[in-house]
Amino acid sequence: MEEITVYSLDYYQMSKEIKREIVHLLHVVWPSDDCNDAHNEELTVQSFYIMKDNQVVSYGAVLRMETTIDNEKYQIGGLSCIATLPNYRRQGLSSKIVQTATKWIEDNLDFGIFTCKRELEDFYACNGKWQVANNVVLIANRDNNALSSNKLAVIVLIRLFSNKAQVNGQKILNARIYLDLPQGQFI
């Protein structure tokens, strides 16, 4: 079986060529998204990608944020933009991206959290041991019209990694978590 290499780099340190390929991949997977860049420059983004046939064929990102829950600060990361070009699906590429990104969150942050459609729950459980957090509400920012997980057709998935996050797990698993994301952004 062919070895799959996942490259990991801060999104803003990538070459323009790789960024263009990522934007193209995301546009192929989600044609309605009209953007010139994969990520808002206000975000801190760790990117993960797989190259085949001299092109980016699979991509995922971790949006890195800080949040405060019950006066305790946490460094958190949310999986985002997990996508593989249609001709390269069913090869385990997105699985490898999620596994690698999850390990990066485990090694660098207190906990990981993001939203997805319910039908993707098993995929994330199998590829990163992500668990549904029924009592967590994710809120994009403190604006009155901020996107919120309880108003969208999504579930919240979470993994607690650091000792601090595990000790405070009950508080985290029952929290309203503000992400301080730019207007219109969500994970």
Image: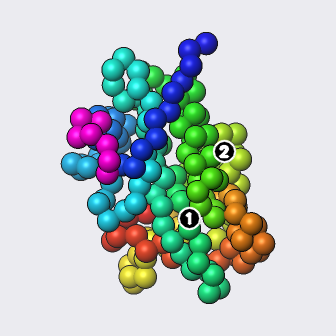
- Which residue occupies 37% across, 62% down? 43
Q: Nearer the viewer, residue 127 or 1?
A: 1
Secondary structure state at the residue bearing disc 1: strand
| Picture coordinates of residue 3, whole percent (x, y) | 56, 19
Relative to 73, residue 157 above or below: above
Q: Residues within 10 Å of mark 1 (few under 14, many from 20)?
A: many
Q: Amino acid at mark 2?
A: Gly
| Picture coordinates of residue 38, whole percent (x, y) | 31, 49
Q: Which mark is residue 89?
A: none
The answer to which quarter of the image holds residue 174 is bottom right
Q: Which residues are magenta?
A: 12-18
Q: In the image, is residue 16 part of the stretch drawn in magenta?
A: yes
Q: What distance separates the C-alpha of mark 2 from that of mark 1?
A: 16 Å
Q: Residues within 10 Å of mark 2 (few under 14, many from 20)?
A: many
- Which residue occupies 53% across, 37% down? 97
- Which residue occupies 58% across, 40% down? 100
In the rendered view, does 13 fall on the left or right side of 133? Answer: left
Q: In the image, is residue 6 part of the stretch drawn in magenta?
A: no
In the rendered view, does 1 fall on the left or right side of 183? Answer: right
The nearer-to-camera label among 2 and 1 is 1
Residue that badge 2 annotates: 128
- Which residue occupies 41% across, 55% down? 45
Residue that badge 1 annotates: 76
